[in-house]
């Protein structure tokens, strides 16, 4: 394999630079769980670097379904067109299509109400930087109350159904219409252009979990879902088939607040486990499993017409679990609209800042300047006035005596306002004198005070002072403010195997 840097995405990967017309293929469906799409699309990435990998990806290219999912309007980027052909945003969805399932499998896998097959349960956006070195996944809970272009406000999971119903034509054309309206809704919400679209059907997800030998997850506590009957013990366990499907759907009997956020957390952990399996040496060194994965991808994945699997795979072949992150829209809160429970969006600026941070390309790290020790002088050249803000009687006099013993010209200056922080102040230009004193009071704060006499340094003792020659007590770390009633899913990587509720 070449040591050269993976190539940037070429212009043909970006749908703004030209699309091929055509109709999608596949049966009727309801978009369901984004984990299924991720597993199918990224399964081809691990085989891109060899002749065998080239062959397998071409097999997938030849058999994968295609759809006209990318809209020509209502899908723009607040950052402008600068990322065209370089960084990429993809929308991942899952499909509850019953195509290929037996009646027994339909019952076993609880595919849902056959009359409600077009609402999306969960969606994910994946952002890939231009150098292909990482991937960031953002979950969009289905109950988010959002603006759906042309349809007013509603839950996010209704956008696909609305787009499906807007189209007069074949089922294939209507499903493409559903995907386009969903993309427009996500673009409107995030301010980002969605460049590509991928979905995987239910049977593909079930089969893929079996091919990779199941997926390992770890639960901090047991859970029982009285709605679906799902039961999971606490501790590490391997899930496959119907158990895997129940796990990524579960949102009842989980944690303190049974919600879509609990389901999102399960999906993210499951995806991480799936990726660890797909990128493991067990699969990387097993051509038979590689072939099975790629054949499954070809039979169960639907992509937009502009996505080149081979080029994407080549670009991302160096991605490792530690550089794949999972996040959720921040600041969502419970609300009720006409008696229906929804997730209310945070202020617009919160979303703007979140997605701006997500898509900001990191600046190249500058070479750090060599560290230089601060200039000092002999203690005998430093006049120190010690002031007591610690509240301990006699502290200033004792510190002044200790400093005098160490060679400083030191005296007690009396009391100072109460302070939690020991501080050294000095006049502009007396940095060396301040540095000499700071070496005897490690950790003290240093500040400039031009009201001091030239050559005089003040030492204000705070409650953190422990004596001359001793470091001050380190301040306790401050925790981030908690937003009341706001759901928060901490960011985690695909390498994180810690337990969840």
Image: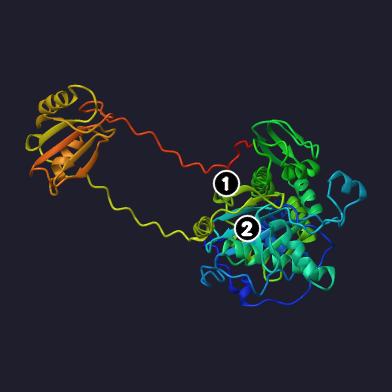
Rendered residue at 72%/62% (across/down): 159
Q: Nearer the viewer, residue 294 or 224?
A: 224
Helix, strand or loop under label 1: strand
* Count of marks, rendered view: 2
The answer to whether residue 185 of the structure is visible from this angle is: yes
- The picture places residue 389, in percent across and down from the top left corner, at 22, 30
> For mark 1, what is the residue?
493
Circles 2, 1 touching at the beta carbon (< 8 Å):
no
Rendered residue at 55%/55% (across/down): 134
Q: Is residue 136 left or right of residue 215?
A: left
Q: Quadrant of residue 446?
A: top left
- The picture places residue 340, in percent across and down from the top left corner, at 72, 50
The answer to whether residue 62 of the structure is visible from this angle is: no
User: In the rendered image, which quarter contains the N terminus?
Assistant: bottom right
Q: Residues within 10 Å of mark 2 (few under 14, many from 20)?
A: many
Rendered residue at 56%/44% (across/down): 490
Q: Nearer the viewer, residue 234 or 166?
A: 166
Helix, strand or loop under label 2: strand
> For mark 2, what is the residue?
125
Quick one: which residue is furthest to the top in this view?
A: 393
Q: Quadrant of residue 137?
A: bottom right
């Amino acid at each position: 394999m070449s040591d050269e840097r993976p190539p940037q995405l070429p212009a043909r990967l970006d749908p703004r630079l030209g699309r091929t017309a055509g109709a999608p293929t596949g049966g009727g469906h309801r978009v369901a769980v984004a984990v299924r799409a991720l597993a199918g699309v990224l399964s081809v990435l691990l085989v891109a670097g060899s002749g065998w990998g080239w062959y397998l990806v071409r097999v997938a290219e030849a058999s994968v379904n295609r759809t006209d999912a990318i809209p020509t309007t209502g899908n723009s980027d607040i950052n402008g067109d600068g990322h065209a052909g370089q960084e990429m945003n993809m929308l991942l969805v899952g499909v509850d299509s019953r195509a290929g399932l037996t009646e027994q499998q339909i019952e076993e896998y609880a595919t849902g109400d056959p009359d409600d097959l077009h609402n999306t349960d969960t969606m994910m956006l994946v952002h890939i930087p231009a150098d292909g070195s990482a991937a960031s996944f953002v979950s969009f809970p289905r109950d988010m109350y959002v603006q759906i272009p042309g349809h007013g406000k509603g839950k996010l999971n209704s956008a696909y159904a609305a787009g499906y119903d807007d189209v007069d034509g074949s089922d294939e054309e209507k499903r493409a219409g559903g995907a386009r309206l969903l993309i427009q809704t996500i673009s409107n919400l995030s301010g980002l252009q969605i460049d590509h679209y991928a979905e995987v059907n239910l049977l593909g997800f079930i089969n893929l979990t079996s091919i990779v030998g199941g997926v390992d997850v770890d639960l901090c506590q047991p859970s029982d879902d009285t709605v679906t009957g799902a039961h999971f013990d606490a501790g590490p366990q391997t899930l496959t088939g119907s158990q895997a499907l129940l796990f990524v759907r579960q949102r009842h009997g989980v944690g303190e607040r049974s919600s879509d956020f609990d389901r999102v957390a399960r999906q993210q952990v499951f995806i991480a486990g799936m990726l660890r399996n797909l990128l493991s040496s067990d699969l990387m060194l097993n051509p038979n499993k590689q072939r099975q994965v790629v054949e499954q991808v070809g039979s169960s994945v639907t992509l937009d017409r502009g996505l080149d699997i081979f080029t994407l795979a080549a670009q991302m072949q160096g991605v490792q679990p530690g550089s794949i992150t999972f996040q959720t829209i921040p600041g969502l809160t419970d609300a009720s609209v006409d008696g229906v429970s929804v997730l209310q969006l945070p202020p617009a600026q919160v979303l703007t800042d979140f997605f701006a941070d997500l898509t900001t390309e990191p600046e190249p790290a500058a070479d750090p300047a060599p560290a230089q020790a601060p200039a000092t002088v002999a203690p005998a050249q430093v006049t120190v006035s010690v002031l007591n803000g610690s509240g301990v009687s006699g502290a200033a006099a004792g510190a002044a005596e200790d400093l005098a013993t160490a060679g400083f010209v030191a005296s007690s200056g009396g009391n100072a306002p109460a302070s939690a922080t020991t501080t050294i102040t000095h006049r502009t230009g007396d940095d060396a004198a301040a540095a000499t004193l700071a070496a005897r009071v490690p950790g003290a704060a240093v500040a400039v005070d031009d009201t001091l006499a030239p050559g005089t340094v003040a030492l204000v003792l705070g409650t953190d002072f422990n004596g001359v020659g001793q470091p001050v007590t380190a301040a306790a770390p401050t925790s981030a403010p908690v937003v009341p009633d706001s759901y928060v899913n901490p960011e985690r990587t695909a390498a994180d195997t810690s337990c969840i509720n």
